[in-house]
């Protein structure tokens, strides 16, 4: 699947959730519920497409989809206690899940939180720690600006996505170029 398609659809379920929930201002409970249910189905479909791909999925996208899946599942299963927790945490819930996914993938995955499989493990861990630190800052910002969906969620998520791309590009440039330079040259056609 081409890279531009991944870039286009990576936050589609989260965008669908936000658009549906906040279309006419702050959502009432019924619209909040439908937004989570619709977005959780979209997240499930997206994960079914993205996870089997050979390159690792964006951990930020995985975390956003996990946030939506947990919210949708809580509504489908009538787990009101969990929804009260989400309501109390507001926008910071997604960053808490991002931190959990980030820590888990930094420790337990070769590609780390940055989802880079082209670089050696140590630089991947270092880049993942930078992304974890930025996610922790995003969590603090979301708590500080609680209730302002742009300052507490939209801008920090965009910032994290941009930082992840910068870190992955940097790793690919540093270690992809080194791998290309160290390989043996192939002879030209017809050359003996």
Image (cartoon, rainbow, N blue to C red):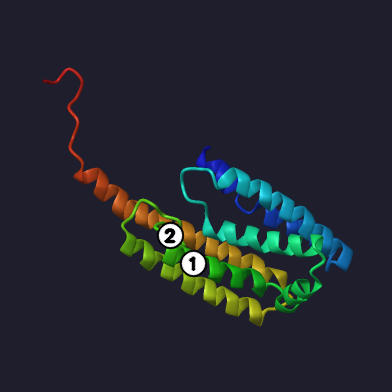
Quadrant for residue 155, please give it.
bottom right
| Whole-percent x, y for residue 139 in the image | 59, 76
Compared with 132, 24 (above or below) is above
| Whole-percent x, y for residue 189 in the image | 20, 20
| Whole-percent x, y for residue 160 in the image | 53, 64
Can residue 28 be seen? no
Q: Secondary structure at mark 2?
A: loop
Residue drawn at (53%, 76%) of the image: 136
| Whole-percent x, y for residue 80 in the image | 81, 72
Residue drawn at (42%, 67%) of the image: 107
Foreground residue among 123 and 151:
123
143 left or right of 32 in image = left
Quadrant for residue 88, please give it.
bottom right
Q: Residues within 10 Å of mark 1 (few under 14, many from 20)?
A: few
Foreground residue among 13 and 75:
75
Compared with 160, 10 (above or below) is above
Q: Which mark is residue 161?
A: none
97 left or right of 40 in image = left
Can residue 172 be seen? yes
Q: Which mark is residue 104?
A: 1
Quadrant for residue 174, please give it.
bottom left
Distance between mark 2 and mark 1 Cα atoms: 8 Å
Badge 2 is on which residue? Answer: 109
25 left or right of 162 in image = right
Q: Which part of the image, by quadrant, shows the C terminus?
A: top left
168 left or right of 13 in image = left
Q: Residues within 10 Å of mark 2 (few under 14, many from 20)?
A: some
Whichever of callouts 2 and 1 sits on the residue coming sooner in the sequence is: 1
Q: Secondary structure at mark 1?
A: helix
Residue drawn at (57%, 41%) of the image: 5
Residues at marks 2 and 1 touching, judged by CB atoms closer than 8 Å: yes
């Amino acid at each position: 699947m081409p890279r531009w398609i991944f870039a286009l659809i990576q936050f589609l379920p989260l965008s669908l959730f936000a658009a549906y929930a906040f279309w006419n201002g702050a959502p009432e409970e019924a619209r909040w519920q439908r937004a989570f249910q619709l977005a959780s189905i979209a997240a499930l479909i997206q994960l079914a497409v993205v996870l089997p791909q050979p390159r690792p999925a964006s951990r930020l996208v995985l975390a956003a989809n996990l946030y939506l899946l947990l919210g949708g599942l809580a509504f489908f299963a009538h787990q009101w206690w969990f929804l009260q927790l989400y309501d109390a945490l507001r926008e910071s819930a997604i960053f808490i899940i991002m931190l959990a996914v980030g820590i888990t993938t930094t420790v337990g995955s070769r590609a780390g939180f940055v989802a880079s499989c082209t670089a050696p493990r140590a630089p991947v861990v270092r880049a993942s720690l930078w992304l974890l630190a930025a996610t922790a800052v995003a969590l603090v910002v979301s708590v500080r600006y609680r209730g302002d969906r742009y300052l507490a969620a939209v801008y920090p998520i965009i910032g994290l996505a941009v930082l992840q791309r910068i870190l992955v590009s940097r790793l690919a440039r540093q270690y992809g170029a080194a791998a290309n330079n160290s390989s043996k040259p192939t002879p030209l056609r017809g050359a003996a």
